[in-house]
Image (cartoon, rainbow, N blue to C red):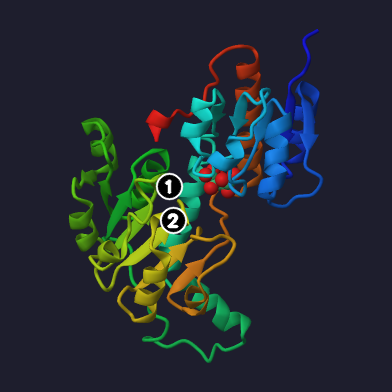
Amino acid sequence: PRKKPVVFVTRKLPDVVETRMRELFDTRLSADDRPLSQAELVAAVREVDVLVPTVTDRLDAGVLSQAGPNLKLIANFGNGVDNIDVETATNRGIAVTNTPGVLTEDTADMTMALILAVPRRIAEGIKVMEGGDWAGWSPTWMLGRRIWGKRLGIIGMGRIGQAVARRALAFGMSIHYHNRRRLPGEVEDRLEATWWESLDQMLARMDVVSVHCPHTPGTYHLLSARRLRLMKKDAYLVNTARGEIVDENTLARMLEAGELAGAGLDVFEQEPAVNPKLVKSDRVVLLPHMGSATIEGRIDMGEKVIINIKTFMDGHRPPDRVLPSML
Ligand code: 8YV
């Protein structure tokens, strides 16, 4: 029988996924569940046939330049591939795959939770209750802002953006989006979505803006200081995509100065570090990168990783191959 490929998994995955991987491959699991150092990553890419990294492993050109002759596939456990220099990998003949589709609905749910939580001041309400500070109901106390009838601007209308649009439509919001390509008319009709060719113009008109594009060199600080300042003073920003897409420092300063009504953030520029201004602010709801964190989702992601490795090792094109041209 053919030798099983050596597969290195950088982080602890659900038990069922690890068990299945052990059955199928010569699977090496990292000793403890923590982000690997660059030196540990280099040691891994020198040795193995397949690497299964996560968002916490940075496979940049420096690491990839030291890849050994066996490394043929990087099967990312995650949708975003901004942790991997896909161009360098591809040039070196290393295929890259990701796990699209299976975390769409979970991430959209968490986005909707933030779209509700920030304007309706849910975190502040919890703090009042936990502190035993509730003096009693008053008609003018703890008033948030209504989301029904408000305009939601979605940046990046791929799978997740569209799943958010479906939910927000059911909550009575009007759907607007900015995307490199305009969606087909039937999809726009179904989502009652309005396309804005100009991101700047859309930003100036929205009550809630939600980020759903990938982080690429082209989208780094897409929401720059200049663009954040185009938003209405009473608008909210939600980000469950990648911290790097938003100029976090400017966002924090604007929230502090009351130049923006609030923000719901699941992702940050320097995870796990968070700007202290954001932590102090009562205009924000902050989550520790939990967008896709469901048991079902993680198992589905693991299954996708396994299918990608198996298909590739059988000599076929893996279903979720990522090419530089797709980014
Ligand atoms: C994970 C994600 O938390 O898939 C992504 O892009 O951000 C999340 O699903 C993480 O990336 C897993 O590597």
- Tell me if 58 is positioned left or right of 243 in this view: right
Residue at image coords 37%, 39%:
158
Q: Could you say where residue 107 lies in the image, as x and y percent from the top left?
A: 50, 48
Residue at image coords 40%, 54%:
245
Q: Could you say where residue 231 lies in the image, as x and y percent from the top left?
A: 25, 66
- Is the C-beta of the residue carrying label 1 under 8 Å from the nearest atom of ligand 1? no
**Kind of residue indicated by mark 1:** His
Q: Say what secondary structure mark 2 lies in.
A: helix
Residue at image coords 34%, 75%:
254
As drawn, the label of residue 244 is 2
The residue that mark 1 highlights is: 215
- Is the C-beta of the residue carrying label 2 under 8 Å from the nearest atom of ligand 1? no
* Among the 4 quarters of the image, the one containing residue 223: bottom left
Query: Which residue occupies the foreground of this view, 184 or 213?
Result: 213
* Residue 119 visible, this orientation: no
* Residue 233 visible, this orientation: yes
Q: Quarter of the picture for ligand 1? A: top right
Query: Dots 1 and 2: beta carbons under 8 Å?
Result: yes
Residue at image coords 64%, 41%:
298
